[in-house]
């Protein structure tokens, strides 16, 4: 039997973690009154990153509400949910990109191999190399293909001479599956490549500075289906070496590339689970509504 909770959501019997739970209230106006408990296990054993009770505000408006989520090693975590639910905001917490947004405030704990990335003494420059980011629109620098890759290793001091730098460029392009297509035109502008090649160039640029985690915010939404398929295959290969968190508006993509899926709704992390479970047997009514196309 389905029940209706006080906030108006239809809840299923499977959702019994919430059914008997009192609504969280607070006397402080800025704290959300309708924070939801996440359904499913947000943790993994031996995580690469661990987020605990993360809140994000843009001035007074709360965009992420008490979200806890682990990012495992060698896994792809997909973040899905309706537009505006906070996926990009949450992703940006993982390498402190929200620091660059005026009025944006992050609280809670975000641990990288046990250390708080927001702690004193953490330098964001190496952090953003360690936790790299690939954006929706490929954004190569207006420089040569070679320089696009060499730039990061050079400023991070990762190559001692030209030979080493050449090696880093070649290895990174190979790992991003682009080497064969560009090896004879390394000195030509990166912006002259096709959209899909540019996105692989951006992935190679991220790889070149030895990341541990790669964040991808809708990395294929500007690409055609063939380029998308190539990137998806690449993501699966990269999982061997990196942890990957990917935001996607494509449920098919989430199902194809990820091992775990996190469903966000209005700033809440509603449900987390193995991708197959989330798509075939969602526990929360809101997840089911989204994946069956009832809203979103
Ligand atoms: N720079 C910003 N300033 C103010 N509000 C923002 C900013 N970026 C996002 N938001 C708001 O935060 C909420 C979550 O946005 P976002 O993380 O971009 O969602 P998604 O990626 O799921 O579409 C939305 O209500 C959005 O309007
Ligand atoms: Mg977004």
Image (tube, grey):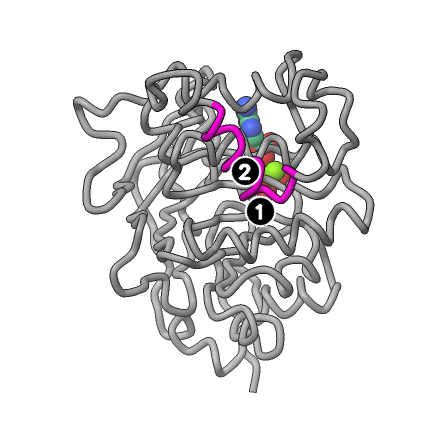
Q: Is residue 159 visible?
A: yes
Q: Is residue 262 left or right of residue 193?
A: left
Q: Residue at x 44, y 57 (%)?
A: 240
Residue 34, placed above or below residue 178: below
> Which residue in the protein does label 2 denote?
88
- The answer to which of 103 and 232 lies nearer the viewer is 232
* Residue at point 65%, 23% (across, down): 139
> Which secondary structure, mark 2?
helix
Tell whether circle 2 marks a residue whose Cβ is less than 8 angstroms from ligand 2: yes
Residue 1 in percent (x, y) is at 56, 87
With 130 as the anchor, is 256 left or right in this view? right
User: Does the magenta portion include 177?
Assistant: yes
Mark 1 CB near ligand 2 (8 Å cut): yes
Q: How many marks?
A: 2
Against 220, residue 99 (above or below) is above
Q: Position of residue 51 (x, y in %)?
A: 32, 47
Q: Pinpoint residue 262: horizontal percent, then vertical percent.
A: 50, 58
| Residue in view at x 36 percent, y 47 percent | 66
Residue that label 1 marks: 247
Residue 75's quadrant in the figure? bottom left
Q: Are marks 2 and 1 in contact (CB under 8 Å)?
A: yes
Q: Is residue 50 above or below residue 155?
A: below
Dominant SS of magenta comes to: helix
């Amino acid at each position: 039997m389905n029940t209706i909770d006080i906030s108006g959501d239809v809840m299923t019997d499977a959702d019994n973690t919430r059914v008997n739970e009192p609504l969280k209230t607070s006397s402080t106006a800025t704290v959300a009154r309708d924070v939801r408990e996440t359904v499913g296990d947000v943790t993994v054993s031996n995580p690469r990153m661990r987020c605990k009770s993360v809140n994000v505000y843009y001035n007074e408006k709360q965009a992420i509400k008490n979200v806890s989520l682990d990012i495992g090693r060698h896994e792809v975590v997909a973040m899905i949910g309706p537009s505006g639910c906070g996926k990009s905001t949450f992703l940006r917490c993982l390498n402190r990109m929200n620091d660059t947004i005026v009025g944006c405030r992050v609280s809670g704990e975000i641990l990288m191999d046990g250390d708080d990335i927001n702690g004193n003494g953490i330098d964001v420059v190496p952090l953003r190399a360690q936790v790299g980011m690939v954006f929706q629109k490929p954004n190569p620098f207006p420089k040569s293909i070679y320089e696009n890759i060499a730039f990061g290793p050079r400023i991070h001091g990762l190559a001692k001479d030209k030979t080493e730098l050449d090696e880093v460029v070649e290895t990174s392009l190979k790992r991003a599956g682009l080497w064969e297509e560009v090896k004879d035109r390394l000195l030509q502008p990166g912006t002259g490549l096709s959209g899909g090649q540019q996105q692989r160039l951006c992935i190679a640029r991220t790889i070149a500075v030895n990341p541990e985690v790669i964040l991808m915010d809708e990395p294929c939404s500007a690409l055609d289906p063939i380029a998308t398929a190539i990137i998806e295959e690449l993501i699966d290969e990269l999982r061997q070496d990196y942890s990957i968190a990917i935001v996607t508006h494509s449920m098919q993509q989430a199902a194809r590339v990820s091992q775990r899926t996190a469903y966000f709704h209005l700033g809440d992390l509603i449900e987390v689970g193995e991708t197959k479970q989330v798509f075939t047997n969602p526990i929360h009514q809101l997840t089911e509504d989204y994946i069956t196309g009832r809203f979103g």
